[in-house]
């Protein structure tokens, strides 16, 4: 794809630069990769062009990148520690309105741009810390739940027969229960068991404390967010098993699968090297949409008292605590609620845009329009 063949916008040029840098980075790790995969790099650029021409998709990408950035760096850039209770240093700092400035007993000036909670903790710092909690829970849920569902769906769809029947009936059992009710049940019974595991495995406890950016003093309540993760994993895999199984049933009848069998490739190679790459598009869209769903469900579980508990910062828990002081402390409901909505909205907008981006017909129509516009000039 010649760079002079298209009329490109500023976003197109930025995306081209990013993709070229990514391709060169891969080429450094795997010498010769760039030359062998020039067509793939061109396809990536067309995907980026499709995203750049979808205003909702661009907005969704911005919101998602902001969520990820805050989730990674939030605890570092937060003005105060999530464990700093200003009420002990500055009496009257509890439930301070946004923009409040208070003076501590030792004459330090504290500024709370978004106000404080009933302990005098800075709401902005809690939201930044809570982004880490939400991001970690979302990523672990997707990273563990999705592959499990994909593998079961591949096996069921490829082998069929009794294997398919067994896996799908187990899947139906999980799907028979409302996802939220099932998540509540597991989130309520798992914390004690997880706490025992953490007590006997100090390295595992320290790893999750580091991952959530928590203080060692919070090790005793670390099991609560981990229970939410396990509950969401149990709830989330059946949907992927269903989607992948249906796609595999169709893909296994294609000629390229028959050709792979004819040359003696193993079933495992056929499933993971030939079928999965050709059905991964809808799964990627589903994953993107599910990130928003996980953010909402995790916040819902915490609001119900089944997730992280203070002093661990969690968006759902902040809303619940703020509800006890509504309407006096309206900011404790409105601002965290808005953050949750924007985070979920970003993932949903990006997921909708991905449907078009992963459609070859859409990409080719964009390529044609760009070429036509260039010729008209």
Image (tube, rainbow, N blue to C red):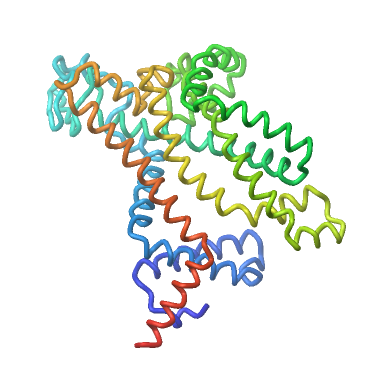
In the rendered image, the vertical position of residue 151 relative to residue 271, given as above or below: above
Residue 294 versus residue 211: which sits nearer the camera? 294
The residue under the point 37% across, 35% down is: 131
Residue 333 versus residue 180: which sits nearer the camera? 180
Quadrant for the C terminus, please. bottom left
User: x, y percentage for residue 215?
Assistant: 42, 22
Asked if residue 366 lies left or right of residue 265, the reply is left
In the rendered image, the vertical position of residue 235 relative to residue 190, given as above or below: below
**Image quarter for residue 332?**
top left
The residue under the point 40% across, 69% down is: 12
Residue 193 versus residue 255: which sits nearer the camera? 255
In the rendered image, the vertical position of residue 25 relative to residue 188, given as above or below: below
User: x, y percentage for residue 303?
Assistant: 36, 22
User: x, y percentage for residue 363?
Assistant: 49, 68
The residue under the point 66% across, 44% down is: 245
Residue 58 versus residue 235: which sits nearer the camera? 235
In the rendered image, the vertical position of residue 5 relative to residue 227, given as above or below: below
User: x, y percentage for residue 114?
Assistant: 20, 32
**Image quarter for residue 366?**
bottom left
The residue under the point 52% across, 15% down is: 191
Asked if residue 369 lies left or right of residue 30, the reply is left
């Amino acid at each position: 794809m010649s760079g002079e063949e298209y009329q490109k916008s500023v976003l197109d040029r930025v995306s081209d630069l990013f993709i070229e840098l990514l391709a060169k980075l891969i080429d450094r790790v795997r010498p010769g990769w760039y030359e062998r995969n020039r067509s793939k790099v061109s396809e990536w650029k067309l995907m980026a062009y499709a995203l750049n021409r979808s205003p909702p998709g661009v907005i969704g990408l911005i919101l998602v990148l902001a969520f990820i950035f805050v989730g990674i760096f939030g605890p570092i850039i937060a003005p105060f520690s999530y464990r700093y209770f200003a009420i002990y240093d500055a009496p009257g700092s509890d439930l301070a309105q946004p923009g409040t400035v208070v003076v501590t007993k030792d004459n330090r000036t504290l500024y709370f741009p978004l106000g404080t909670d009933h302990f005098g903790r800075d709401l902005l710092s809690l939201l930044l810390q809570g982004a880490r909690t939400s991001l970690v829970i979302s990523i672990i849920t997707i990273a563990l739940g999705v592959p499990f569902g994909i593998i079961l769906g591949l096996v069921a769809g490829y082998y069929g027969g009794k294997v398919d029947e067994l896996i799908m009936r187990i899947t139906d059992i999980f799907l028979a229960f409302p996802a939220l009710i099932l998540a509540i049940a597991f989130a309520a019974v798992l914390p004690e068991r997880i706490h025992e595991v953490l007590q006997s495995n100090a390295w595992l406890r320290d790893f999750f404390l580091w991952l959530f950016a928590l203080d060692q003093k919070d090790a005793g309540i670390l099991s609560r967010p981990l229970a939410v993760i396990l509950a969401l994993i149990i709830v989330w895999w059946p949907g992927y098993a269903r989607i992948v199984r249906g796609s595999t049933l169709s893909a296994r009848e294609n000629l390229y699968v028959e050709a792979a069998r004819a040359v003696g490739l193993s079933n495992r190679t056929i499933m993971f090297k030939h079928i999965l790459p050709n059905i991964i598009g809808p799964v990627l869209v589903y994953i993107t949409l599910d990130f928003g769903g996980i953010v909402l469900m995790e916040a819902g579980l915490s609001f119900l008292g089944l997730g992280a508990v203070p002093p661990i910062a969690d968006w759902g828990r902040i809303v619940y605590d703020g509800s006890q002081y509504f309407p006096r402390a309206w900011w404790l409901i409105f601002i965290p609620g808005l953050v949750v909505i924007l985070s979920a909205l970003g993932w949903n907008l990006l997921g909708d845009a991905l449907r078009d981006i992963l459609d070859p017909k859409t990409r080719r129509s964009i390529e044609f329009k760009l070429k036509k516009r260039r010729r008209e000039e």
